[in-house]
Image: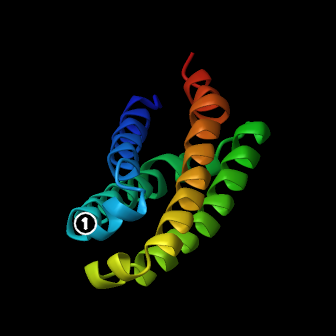
Amino acid sequence: MKTDRYRKHHDELLNVVGNIQKYLTVEEVQSNPAVIRKLLTILAGAVRIHLAFEDRALYPSLLASTNSTVSTTAKQFMDEMSGIQGVLEGYLDKYHSVKIIKNNPDDFIYETKELFKVLGERIGRENRDFYPLVDAMND
C-alpha cells in the first residue's frame, strides 16, 4: 500500500491552511469573514475526505498487520486523530457563521493558529514517521 494519495491530501490541506492564514489579522477577519468561512468549509470537507479514506482504506489493513510495529503505530495514530478530529469539529461548530468570525477576531485568530499548529504537526508526523513505515511494507 503506497501513501501517495494521502500525501497529496496533506498537500491540499496545507494549501487551504495557507490560504486561510493570509486572513489572520484583525483587519482581514473583519473585512473578509465570508471568504474565511468559505475557506473553512473547504478545509472541513478536505479533512473529512482524508479521514474517510484513512478510516476505510488505510487503517483497517494496518491494524490487522502481523508486523507489531505497524499495527501499534497505526493504532496510536488513529487514536490520536480522533482527539484532533474532536477539536476540529468543536472549532468548526464554534465558528459556523460569518457573524461569529467577524465579531470575534482575536479569539478566532488565536484559535485558528492553535488548530493549524496541531494539524501541521500531525501532518508532519504522518509524512515523516508514519507514511514511510506504511510505504516500507511494500518494499
Q: Nearer the viewer, residue 59 or 96?
A: 96
Residue 123 falls left or right of residue 94: right
Residue 131 placement: quadrant? top right
Q: Which residue is mark 1?
A: 31
All told, the count of numbered labels is: 1
Tell me if residue 6 comes above or below residue 107 in the rendering: above
Residue 21 falls left or right of residue 127: left
Tell me if residue 91 comes above or below residue 58 in the rendering: below
Residue type at mark 1: give it: Ser
Q: Residues within 10 Å of mark 1 (few under 14, many from 20)?
A: few
Q: Position of residue 22 (x, y in %)?
A: 36, 47
Residue 97 placement: quadrant? bottom left
Q: Position of residue 121 (x, y in %)?
A: 63, 44
Q: Is residue 121 visible?
A: yes
Residue furthest front in the image: 27
Tell me if residue 39 comes above or below residue 91 in the rendering: above
Residue at x-position 34% and y-position 57%: 43
Q: Mark 1 falls on what kind of element? A: helix
How is the rendered protein coloured?
A: rainbow
Residue at x-position 36% and y-position 34%: 8
Q: Nearer the viewer, residue 88 or 77?
A: 88
Q: Quadrant of the C terminus?
A: top right
Residue 15 falls left or right of residue 120: left
Q: Position of residue 104 (x, y in %)?
A: 44, 79
Residue at x-position 59% and y-position 37%: 124
Q: Nearer the viewer, residue 78 or 109?
A: 109
Q: Position of residue 35 (x, y in %)?
A: 21, 62
Q: Is residue 85 visible?
A: no
Residue at x-position 35% and y-position 54%: 23
